[in-house]
Amino acid sequence: GGPVFGWGQREYRVRRVLQLENPEDCQRLRQKASVVDVPGALRKPQFRQLIQDLKDTMFAENGQGIAAPQIGVRKRVFVFYADFGDPRSHIPVTVVINPVITPTSTVLHVMEEGCLSVRHGERRGVVARPSEVRIQFFDENGVLRSAVAKGAHSAILQHEADHLDGVLFVDHEEEPGTCCEDPEADTDEYFQYDD
C-alpha cells in the first residue's frame, strides 16, 4: 500500500520505500530477487500495476530509478530515467526486467550516489564503477533489448541492478579521499540501444 492520488485520468499509487536503517526492511533489502516470468507476468494485472507503482513511487520520491525490492517485491525489475539537462543524455522512463549487465571497460567512473532506501536519499557516498556496460533486458512489452551505457547512465543501471541482488551503494562506497576519476575516463554519457 501507500497513498493513492487521483490526478488526471488515473490513480497514482506511491508505495513505501524500504529503509536500510530499519532492521526488518534491511533484511528484505538484502534478499536476492527472483527472475520474472516473461512474457507470462506481463499479462498479469498485478505485474502491470507493479510497474506503474514503481514509476509513480520513483517520481514521488524524486529518484532517478527504483527497483522492486525497494518497495518490498522480490522480482528482478527496476525503472529508471535520466535527465541531466542535456537533451543528448536524456533517457525516458525505462522499464528493465531480468537485466544482465556486463562491464565493457576497465576504466572507472567515479560518482557521488544516493539511494531512496538509505535515509530516503539524503545520505550520499562516492562510488567507483565500470564506466561502460552492456545491458540485456526485457522491456515492459516483453521485447528483449540490448544497449550500451556509459558514464552516469552506466552507474544508474549498475546501482539499480545491484538492488536485485541485495546490494546497496554503501557496499561499494569508497573512503573519502581514496578514490579519484580514472585518468583514462572521458566525460561521455550515453545510453544507446543496439537496434
Image: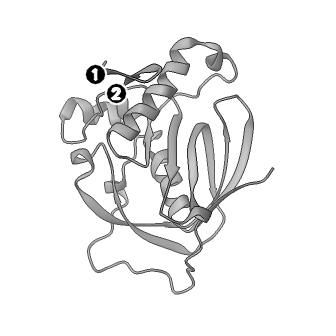
Q: Is residue 183 above or below residue 155?
A: below
Q: Residue furthest right?
A: 195
Residue at the spot 54% in from the left edge and 19% down from the top edge: 47
Q: Are marks 1 and 2 in contact (CB under 8 Å)?
A: yes
Q: Quadrant of the N terminus?
A: top left
**Which of the two discs, 1 and 2, labels the residue nearer the N terminus?**
1
Residue carrying label 2: 14
Is 89 on the left-hand or right-hand side of 109?
right
Point out residue 94 in the picture as x, y percentages from the top left corner.
58, 42
Q: Which image quarter: residue 136?
A: top right
Camera-side residue: 82 or 161? 82
Q: Amino acid at mark 1?
A: Pro
Question: Residue at point 37% right, 33% down?
Answer: 57
Residue 171 visible here:
yes
**Residue 41 lies in what quarter of the image?**
top right
Pick the residue in front: 102 or 125: 125
Secondary structure under the numbered disc 1 in the rendered image: loop
Q: Given the image, on which type of amino acid does mark 2 rest?
A: Val
Residue that mark 1 sits on: 3
Residue 119's spot in the image, x, y percent?
21, 47
